Amino acid sequence: MSAILERWNTAAEYFSLMVSRPTPLQYAALCYRKSGHSFEVLLITSRGSGRWILPKGWAIKNTSDFGTAAVEAFEEAGVIGRIGASPLGTYEFHKWMRGGLPVRCTVQVYPLEVEELEDDFPEKDQRQRHWFKIEDAAEKVDEPQLQTMIREFCP
């Protein structure tokens, strides 16, 4: 499977250069809380594969980038809290579209200090959520850039 994905990535990069379209951008919230003398990160499962991810989504019209991240955190994880206006950074991943083709997306990540977790939220029946220690959260996500971002996170 990795050889196929590697070949696909090469072809996709070539095609991307030919078409010159910008990489699609999503906005995510790195949801965290203080736990004793350290911090924990909240991860959720994706709807498709069940992988551990951050709450994220596409831009919302008339909403700031960090506002979009906060809305996605509530819709996907029931998070209410204080979102930072400055991004922590970005990471890239391949989003599998309905036609079965992967699209490389860039995700801009904002810190969100969790003040409350609602039990009733729009995607509660579609996802699981779990608190992880920072190092454990970094190991649970697949994207190397996101792993580094989580490991280096220091609110």
Image (spheres, grey):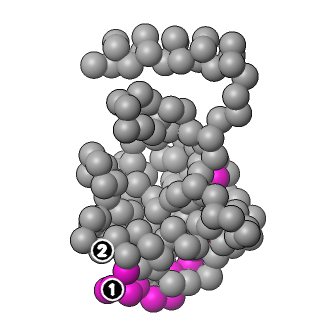
The residue located at (52%, 11%) in the rendering is 11
- Location of the C terminus by quadrant is bottom right
Q: Is residue 150 above or below residue 103?
A: below
- At mark 2, the secondary structure is loop
Q: Is residue 87 visible?
A: yes
For mark 1, what is the residue? 120
Image coordinates of residue 32 in percent, x first then y, are 50, 73
Q: Tell me the magenta residue range.
A: 108-121
Under mark 1, the amino acid is Asp
Image coordinates of residue 29 in percent, x first then y, are 55, 65
Query: Is 121 or 28 nearer to us in this picture?
Result: 121
- At mark 1, the secondary structure is loop
Image coordinates of residue 154 in percent, x first then y, are 61, 65
Q: Is residue 98 above or below residue 79?
A: above
* Residue 33 placement, left or right of 50: right
Under mark 2, the amino acid is Lys
* Residue 20 placement, left or right of 125: right
Q: Where, by quadrant of the figure, is residue 46 drawn?
A: bottom left
Q: Is residue 40 visible?
A: no
For mark 2, what is the residue? 124
